[in-house]
Image (spheres, rainbow, N blue to C red):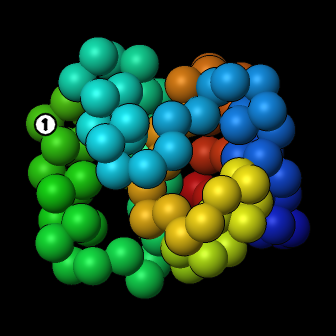
Amino acid sequence: MDKDKVLSYLGLARKAGKLAVGEFLTENAIYAKKALLVIVAEDASDNTKKKFTDRCNHHKVPLRFYKTKEELGNATGSALKASMAVLDEGFSKAILNILN
């Protein structure tokens, strides 16, 4: 399985305007019920991981820990990013199919 397809999908979702990147925007997407999948970097702080685990469980949003902040940032054309929310059903299903 080509795991880097996930990074490609995240980049495409970003270009399509279907990705909320960064802690603040990811949280807003969860609260607004727009997040269909949340990705948190494996090297994010324990505090960040716990916060998104709790929020995603509460709002029933799938959560996956994947890659590093640097790799997620590079894939989405930004600096280090610890969290992001996929806002499109097609992208979220494609990514979950790879990660599950």
Q: Quadrant of the N terminus?
A: bottom right
Can you see residue 6?
no
Identity of the residue drawn at 51% across and 35% down: 20
Note whether 53 is above or below 71 in the view shown. above
Q: Residue 25 falls in which quadrant of the image?
A: top left
Q: On the picture, is 43 further left or further right than 77?
A: left
Q: Position of residue 70 (x, y in %)?
A: 61, 76
Identity of the residue drawn at 74% across and 54% down: 77
Q: Position of residue 18 (x, y in %)?
A: 64, 25
Out of 96 and 28, give the one closest to the viewer: 28
Residue at which label 1 appears: 58
Note whether 23 is above or below 28 in the view shown. below
Q: Residue 100 falls in which quadrant of the image?
A: bottom right
Can you see residue 38?
yes
Q: Position of residue 69 (x, y in %)?
A: 53, 73
Q: Residue 19 falls in which quadrant of the image?
A: top right
Out of 44 and 64, give the one closest to the viewer: 44
Query: Which residue is the extreme one toward the bottom?
Result: 43
Query: Which residue is the extreme one toward the front?
Result: 79
Identity of the residue drawn at 23% across and 24% down: 31
